[in-house]
Image (spheres, rainbow, N blue to C red):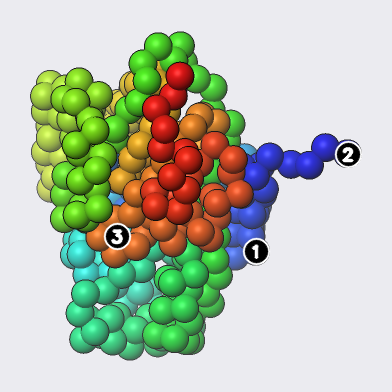
Amino acid sequence: MASLHPMDELKEKLKAILEVVPQDSEIIYLDYPVYNNGGDVLIMKGTEKFFHDYNIKVRARYSAMDFPDKLSIPDNWIIVCHGGGNFGDLYANHQNLREKVVRDFPNHRIVVMPQTIHFESERKADMAAALFNNHPDLHIFVRDTRSYDFATAKFHKCRIRMCPDMAHQLWPLQPSAMPVNDVLYFLRTDIETVAGQQQFDKEADDSNRLDWDTMFTPLEVRGIVYFQKFYRLDKKLGGPLPTRTLWYKYTDYLMNKAISLFSSYKEVRTSRLHGHILSCLLDMPNVVIDNSYGKNSQYYETWTSGISKASLHGASDSKLEQPS
């Protein structure tokens, strides 16, 4: 019997979530992304596919922009929070929403989908831990061993489990273009960039160097900004606009553009975790370099090191040769 592809194995591991969000359950999905980080959009698409594949009934969806100040939720609904890399004190809006939900819904099951955890401030970590440990039915999935060790120490009364990123539910993705270009340099330009990225910066020319905010055209980014305005208006008016439906269709377009772009290259070199994961979903060669707090290397060492077409920068120089 042929062995499973490592990506099949990672997708299979996501079934662990069914232990706390069972098939056919009713849920509310919180904190899905409304911004131009394609990695979080990729997570959202994987999360929604997970819900669909296991007949999990999403009764309501809210982003950080339109979550009501007061909300009544039926007792049997499970509150499911979007996964990603914003658990901690680097991205306050998302952490504040999670903490508000934990504070406001002490009698509901709350599930945090796979996250990387990082706090710069020990005081803020302790404050979050005091709140989370007081909740009787809080489940936190984490994406790497460092986050697991941190969570089991700090959030010791919560149920902690390791699980791959939700984007793996999309496996396999089919390439939508021919690989006519050599190397795509998909590199961070934000607060998580590290000095070690300089080698890739020097190799890349402007035509083959992109990030999420430069992959999308100014007009497409403007469209995202307008959606954010509509979300705020939707919250003010009490929700009569079809904003979420239209945003999901728009994100389909954005993801199809990303898949087409990646497919047109023979190799990807990236400091974006989801540049790495998207490459793996497309089964294409890729090299990942770390971010500022070790998220990428931790993820690679925990989950994707067994994928033959993927490598971690600095761990194997042989995979840094230019493709023929």
Residue at image point 34% right, 49% down = 289
**Placement of 172 over or under 28, stated as above or below:** above
**Placement of 316 over or under 203, stated as above or below:** below
Q: What residue is shown with label 2?
A: 1
**Placement of 266 over or under 307, stated as above or below:** above
Q: Nearer the viewer, mark 3 or mark 2?
A: 2
Give the amino acid at mark 3.
Asn
Give the amino acid at mark 2.
Met
Q: Can residue 259 be seen at all in this image of the molecule? A: no
User: In 3D space, how far apart are the residues under numbered discs 1 and 2 (Cα atoms)?
Assistant: 28 Å
Residue at image point 12% right, 35% down = 225
Q: Nearer the viewer, mark 1 or mark 3?
A: 3
Residue 18 vs residue 174, the one in the foreground: 174
Mark 3 and mark 2 in contact? Answer it, CB < 8 Å: no
Would residue 194 appear left or right of 147 to someone viewing this image?
A: left
Q: Residues within 10 Å of mark 3 (few under 14, many from 20)?
A: some
Would residue 239 appear left or right of 245 to someone viewing this image?
A: left
What's the mark number on residue 86? Answer: 3
Q: Residues within 10 Å of mark 1 (few under 14, many from 20)?
A: few
Residue 73 vs residue 128, the one in the foreground: 128
Residue at image point 44% right, 61% down = 298
**Placement of 315 over or under 125, stated as above or below:** above
Q: What residue is shown with label 1?
A: 19
Q: Can residue 134 be seen at all in this image of the molecule? A: yes
User: In 3D space, how far apart are the residues under numbered discs 3 and 2 (Cα atoms)?
Assistant: 40 Å
**Mark 3 falls on what kind of element?**
strand
**Mark 2 falls on what kind of element?**
loop
Where residue 270 appears, as percent x and y from the top left, is: 33, 40
Could you tell me which quadrant the C terminus lies in? top left
Q: Nearer the viewer, mark 1 or mark 2?
A: 2
Q: Quadrant of residue 151?
A: bottom left
Where residue 253 appears, as percent x and y from the top left, is: 33, 22
